[in-house]
Amino acid sequence: MASKLYADNTVRDFTKAVADPEGMPQGISVLAASAAGMTAIALRAALISKKERPEGTKDEQLEECIKVLELARGNMLYLMDDGIRAEQPYKKYAASDLTNTENVEHFQASLRVANTIPTDLMYKMQDLSRYLIYLAEEGSQEALDDTAIALQLCKSVLHGARAVILARAQKMTDDIFAMTIRREAEILFQETLPKIDAALDTVEERLKREDP
């Protein structure tokens, strides 16, 4: 499981690279990899649900769910690469002499660049969550555990991306921009997390065992 940059590497190689404090990739690429896993397990749940539909019937909402999740799965792998590219200027200028005015300006610019991918991830998780909610409510009983995993991964990516945004905002000298990106993340949280939690409750309810 790797992006284009890691096409010939194994998961073992990727995790080893992540663990290197001096190396790349970093946390954003891990979040993108988690999001790719989320879309993959959700797609599995959707395809299991499709197999259970009566022959000759077509569920347009389910078909849309499958199409969107398949496209998103590939997109998240590209974001693993994009995360590396977005972090490189930040890593470079964070290690530079920040008593130099020009370096400070480059560093501040790099913070904005580094913020683009976690923000993109948060919006993508919000968009994809509605398909996970659909699977929680209408998907196969046999795939509810996969759906629950997808919902929990979606929450984790949202939390992780928000943490990256907060870390970048803390270092910004532009107070208004920093406040804006923090508030943007909070609004996404307020709009999305309660719906995911409600979907998880739905899964729990559907998985209740009938007492004899």
Image (tube, rainbow, N blue to C red):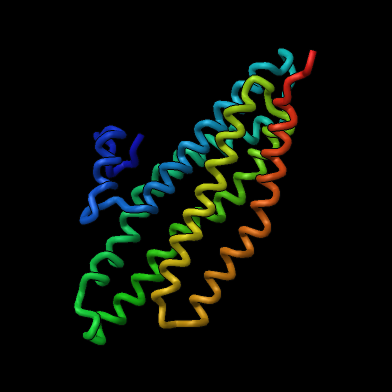
Residue 179 image-quadrant placement: bottom right
Q: Reply above or below: 79 against 15.
A: below
Residue found farthest to the front: 212
Quadrant for the C terminus, please: top right
User: In which quarter of the view is residue 168 placed?
Assistant: bottom left
Residue 31 picture location, percent across and down: 43, 48
Q: Position of residue 45 (x, y in %)?
A: 59, 27
Residue at the (61%, 51%) spot, across then down: 126
- The answer to whether residue 17 is above or below residue 207 is below
- Residue drawn where x is 62% and y is 58% of the image: 189
Q: In this picture, is 161 found above or below 66?
A: below
Q: Position of residue 65 (x, y in %)?
A: 63, 35
Position of the N terminus by quadrant: top left
Is 185 on the left or on the right of 140, as rendered? left
Left or right, 92 with reference to 81? left
Q: Residue at x 73, y 33 (%)?
A: 137
